Image (cartoon, grey):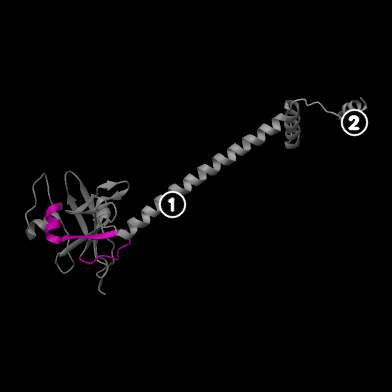
């Protein structure tokens, strides 16, 4: 691994009335690659560090990248070494320029676009590009999850309504001050009052008329 001590790379970018001056560390390791900041995004020369799970790698040819960011007042810089050295003091210690410039975009909400990242079309928090490549199994699991959630919500609502009705009935009994036994006694008394009054005959009274007839 080759390193360069006491080396400063000064990069001046003039883009639409914006001037950016970047000074790299005095010790730069060639394996890790050089990097610059442009429009709040980090760009690497040739080599790129390992990507994280949510990142995707974007690349562009070095000369094309320098040509694009050398754009001043709407005119692109000429693609020759003299103009490159004037506008961008950006090269390796051996005098060569990086062949590839790379950067990263967020894989779920961005996509590689020219020399930067462009936002993806989003539907319900999911990019259109992601929807097109979602496996069928994931769609099936998602539908099961939605149906299960709806069923669980329905059961919870029914349980809540049942408990609420039960609670209201208990409150009603408490306010009336009567127990279940008292309600049963009252219902029995009401039933007895509604029954017709039947005349009660004694068995002796029924036999008396028969005895008198025999005597005659």
> Which percent across, then down, holds residue 215?
93, 27
Q: Secondary structure at mark 2?
A: helix
The image quadrant that residue 172 belongs to is top right
> Can you identify the residue that label 1 sits on?
148
Nearest the viewer among 69 and 150 is 150
Q: Check the image and report above or below for 188 versus 46.
A: above
Q: Mark 2 = which residue?
A: 204
**Is 14 part of what is drawn in magenta?**
no
Stretch in magenta: 46-68
Q: Secondary structure beneath disc 1? A: helix
> In the current view of this chain or complex, which residue is farthest to the right?
215
Frontmost of labels 1 and 2 is 2
Q: Nearer the viewer, residue 200 or 76?
A: 200
Which residue is rendered at x = 55% and y = 44% of the image? 159
Q: Calculate the distance from the C-alpha at mark 1 to the C-alpha at mark 2.
A: 79 Å
Q: Residue at x 26, y 60 (%)?
A: 56
Please report the residue visible at 63 percent of the width from the left and 37 percent of the height from the top: 167
**Number of disc labels:** 2
Check the picture and name the quadrant holding the N terminus. bottom left
Q: The C terminus is located in which quarter?
A: top right
Q: Classify 85 as above or below 164.
A: below
**Going 26% across and 52% down the picture, which residue do you hit?**
110
Residue 23 place in picture, x, y as percent: 25, 57
- Above or below, comparing residue 29 to residue 201 in the picture: below
Q: Are marks 1 and 2 in contact (CB under 8 Å)?
A: no
24 sits left or right of 114 in the view = right
**Looking at the rendering, which quadrant does residue 27 occupy?**
bottom left
Percent x, y of residue 59: 19, 60
Between 72 and 155, the one lying in front of the other is 155
């Amino acid at each position: 691994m080759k390193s360069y001590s006491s080396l400063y790379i000064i990069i001046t970018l003039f883009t639409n009335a914006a001037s950016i001056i970047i000074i790299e560390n005095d010790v730069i390791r060639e394996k890790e690659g050089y990097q610059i900041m442009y429009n709040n995004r980090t760009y690497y020369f040739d080599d790129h560090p390992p990507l994280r799970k949510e990142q995707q790698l974007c690349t562009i040819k070095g000369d094309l990248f320098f040509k694009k960011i050398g754009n001043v007042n709407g005119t692109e810089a000429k693609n020759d070494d003299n103009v490159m050295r004037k506008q961008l003091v950006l090269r390796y210690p051996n005098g060569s320029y990086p062949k590839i410039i790379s950067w990263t975009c967020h894989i779920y909400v961005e996509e590689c676009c020219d020399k930067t990242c462009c936002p993806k079309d989003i539907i319900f928090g999911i990019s259109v590009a992601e929807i097109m490549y979602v496996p069928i199994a994931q769609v099936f699991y998602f539908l099961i999850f939605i149906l299960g959630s709806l069923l669980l919500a329905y059961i919870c609502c029914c349980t809540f309504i049942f408990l609420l009705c039960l609670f209201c009935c208990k409150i009603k009994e408490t306010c009336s001050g009567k127990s279940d036994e008292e309600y049963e006694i009252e219902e029995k008394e009401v039933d007895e009052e509604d029954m017709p009054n039947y005349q009660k005959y004694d068995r002796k009274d029924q036999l008396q008329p028969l005895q008198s007839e025999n005597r005659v």
